[in-house]
Image (tube, rainbow, N blue to C red):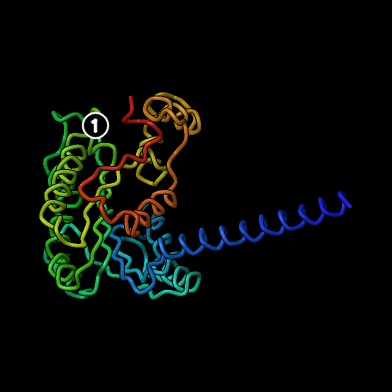
Amino acid sequence: MLTGAFRHSFRRLHSSKLLLTQSSKRRISQGRAIGTDLKGRNALVTGSTSGIGLGIARELARHGANVVLNGFGSAEEVERIRMGISSEFGVSVHFDPANLSSSSQIRQMMSNHTDIDILVNNAGIQYVAPITDFPEEKWDEIIALNLSASFHTCKAVLPNMQRRGWGRIINVASVHGLVASVNKCAYVAAKHGLVGLTKTLALETAETDITVNCINPGWVLTSLVKAQIEVNAAQTGKTFEEAKAAILAQKQPSRQFVKPEELGEVVVFLCSPAAKQITGISLPVDGGWTAQ
């Protein structure tokens, strides 16, 4: 009798736990779906035909956002990327070929896409040299693309966001928006400027449902970083893999490259309801680089 009662109680307890677990899983699943559901939102990601920008665009699309791509590449390659994202995630994907070094082309791009809810300023270029050898035209190019382009896109997109009462602007500013490295005067200056622009716009929109934030990646194995590794390998006589390990050891304590899709998930989080009160921040995603 005691054994039977015990078994009956155990079954009831086990059944209750199972129902609780299933209910909890449903709540967690629903919470995640609500928190990351961007269906119906329209995102524009600059510099998104490769590297970090492409990773961000894919994650936004994965969570339901329609995407406008922008960047360089052959017509065939761009169309392959566009169709691939659209078919994989079932969202609308467009491409705008605007050269972001041109303020008039930026204005045209933004007038072509007046329904942007999420703006990700990611496009950037790099040039490495001591300031005494730094070509003036390279300074102008880097400031124009890495900083001024974001001013122009933000200026154009904000009135429409304010009219609709919602918006998210995420600027990809690099750890070099927080700390410096030698031989990168233009890049560091532009990224520090982007952090300042972000803080200012966050204050100007603080009483609205618009947030403006930076993410600050450390080393990401993009084509830009690969080129730097190749130069380092040639200069030091190391293999590519040895130079890659050395560059990580020098700056990034995790000894791992940040992945573009990880940055994409950070962008998605900053677009979620959980991040509603997060604005004006610079969020390092750098394996501990800026903790040193």
Residue at 15%, 30% in the rendered image: 131
As drawn, 41 above or below 20: below
Q: Amino acid at mark 1?
A: Val
Relative image position of residue 234 (x, y in whole percent): 40, 30
- Whether residue 97 appears in this view of the structure is yes
Please, is residue 182 above or below residue 271 in the view? above
Measured as percent of width and height from the top left, residue 212 is found at 21, 54
- Residue 204 in the image: state x and y as whole percent: 10, 55
From the viewer's perspective, is 196 left or right of 50?
left
Q: How many marks?
A: 1
Badge 1, how many Cα within 10 Å: few under 14, some, many 20+? few
The quarter holding residue 152 reads bottom left
For image coordinates 18% across by 68% down, the residue present is: 161
User: Looking at the rendering, in which quadrant would you find the C terminus?
Assistant: top left
Kindly identify which residue carries mark 1.
Answer: 179
What secondary structure is marked by label 1? loop
Answer whether residue 77 is visible to the viewer in this image: no
In-front residue for pair 21/34: 21
Q: Is residue 78 above or below residue 256?
A: below
Residue 115 shown left or right of residue 267 in the figure: left
* Residue drawn at point x = 14 percent, y = 68 percent: 107
Return the x and y of residue 42 as percentages of the image width and height: 31, 70
In the displayed structure, would residue 144 be above or below residue 81? above
Question: Which residue: 39% across, 47% down?
Answer: 223
